Amino acid sequence: MRSSHWYAGTDRNAYIHRAWMRRGLPQDAFAGGKPHIAIANTASDLTPCNAHLDEVATSVKQGIWEAGGVPLNLPVMSLGETNLRPTAMLWRNLAAMAIEEMLRANPIDGVVLLGGCDKTIPSLLMAAASVDLPAVVVPGGPMLTGHFRGAPLGCGTDVWRLSEEVRAGTLSREAFLRSESAMIRSKGHCNTMGTASTMACLAEALGMTIPGTAGTPAPDARLLERAHEAGRLAVSLVAEDRTPSRVLTRASFLNAIVTLAAIGGSTNAVVHLLAIAGRLGVELTLDDFDRVGSGVPLLVDLQPAGRHLMDDLFRAGGLLAVLKEVGDLLDPSAPTVTGEPLTAYLDAAEIWDETVIRRRSSPLLEDAGIAVLRGNLAPRGAVIKPAAASPQLLRHRGRAVVFDSVEDLNARLDSPDLDVDETSVLILRGCGPRGYPGMPEVGNLPLPRRLLEKGVRDMVRVSDARMSGTAYGTVVLHAAPEAAVGGPLALVRTGDPIVLDVPARRLDIDLPQRELSLRTPVTTGFAEPARGWQRLYIDHVLQADQGADLDFLVGSSGHEVSRESH
């Protein structure tokens, strides 16, 4: 056991390690070859979607004890999407680095990863990939559906929708505020196919959960049952030395891309999967998302791309029922933490409600994959989610209306002097990894009030930012390179003709290159931190098409620690 490097022996150091950890543990906890399993727990009252994970950890502990291991709760850095400013994405890499170092530095043999809120599962997987100790994920699960005025509420998605109706004058502010107490009905993360739900499903598609776990609602007793099973499995993973590098193969990532399309998942998954692959040295590029996902049908009728919510998906058969419909697109060589391939779990899956999970023969959308656009406005790529866009806007030409920052947007969007109409293309720059910093979820720009009052509900929007997985619209995101590093967005001026052609995978400024080369890039509005994490971040963060990890965190360091602390 790796933990024996701390506990075995009769010298002073072994004595110190055992004595301070004993606290009622029996002697054979240290001398009997029992695996010590950390429970990397992102529970926090300030991460409300993960606040229930202490309860989940209790079930994991019971499973570890039952299987002959020693469970050890390890609270780790937690990132709450709704509260953290300027954006939780700024700290994803810091959380991954901190978790990796704590896993490496402590006397543990394996780990159970408890996450839920958007950045927690990605940071846990990045850390586990880098330290490469046996690991299994238990997603915290979505909340139950809330209702307002008799209609279901999709958290996130209906925030965007209802707030725009207030601005349009079709919903009173009083009614909007009354919906607040109904929006979040129970413990758990967002109940739409936002980033949290997407990353839980992709953790399963990658093989890092017990198959059938993803999407189990947070209040459902079956989540605790699966947590117990994961605790038992973690002990077996140590015995069999089944590490993330043995599970997370290129085939696993390609299966995750198929899954992303079939469920109508969040565009944020692109940067997270690229970052996780980078920690493993698995070859994965932005073009893989388009190449593999482009022919995959959308089968899940779930907000924001559809009507239903996550507990409906679970009731209707869950993720495995979805994957059974696209089983021929999955690579059967991709393993899971159980030792069996993912495809081995599909035969028993059934669709119980075809209004929620469509058959392959009647999809919501024939081609649902994330589309990767290139052109002189995004030479290294940008992404759009066609499933959440307006079909008539997927080919569009319009005049640019440019905002240099979120503050500029907020100051001028509703100004009567703003020269904008429904054919305009709203451009927001300065919101990429370095520019903000941290690449906030502001890419789904609100629409100008006077257009909302005319009934306009979607426009083409382009930015170097991200958007919430719960959001929707014809929104082009992750434009790379970003404006803050001299990308073409920094050259755009209001009035420039912008051409979007999603079928042709193009995003361009329709101007001669010679004219663009004579322009001076905008350099105002970008972050310039003097110290601390933000300074380190902007000095080392990679662009969106590389996963927005830090350059010195790409790759792994393993779990060996040779030096003693005393």
Image: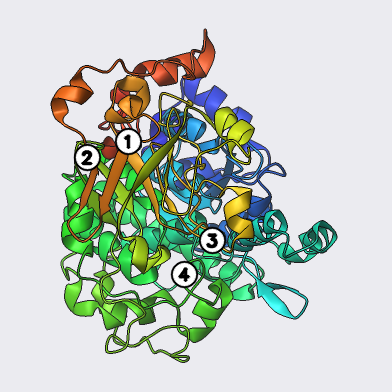
Q: Nearer the viewer, mark 3 or mark 4?
A: 3
In the displayed structure, does residue 521 sit left or right of residue 60? Answer: left
Name the N-terminal-most of marks 2 and 1: 1
Q: Which residue is drawn at 33% across and 71% down?
A: 262
Disc 3 target residue = 456
Figure quadrant of the N terminus: top left
Residue placed furthest toward the top? 530
Badge number at residue 510? 2
Badge 2 amino acid: Asp
In the displayed structure, does residue 57 sit left or right of residue 356? Answer: right
Badge 1 amino acid: Asp
In the displayed structure, does residue 419 sit left or right of residue 497? Answer: right
Q: Is mark 2 on a helix, strand or loop?
A: loop
- The Cα atoms of the two marked residues, 2 and 1, are separated by 7 Å
Q: Which residue is drawn at 50% across and 31% down?
A: 91
Q: Quadrant of residue 170?
A: bottom right
Disc 4 target residue = 213
Say whether residue 267 is visible: yes
- The Cα atoms of the two marked residues, 1 and 4, are separated by 49 Å
Q: How is the image coloured?
A: rainbow
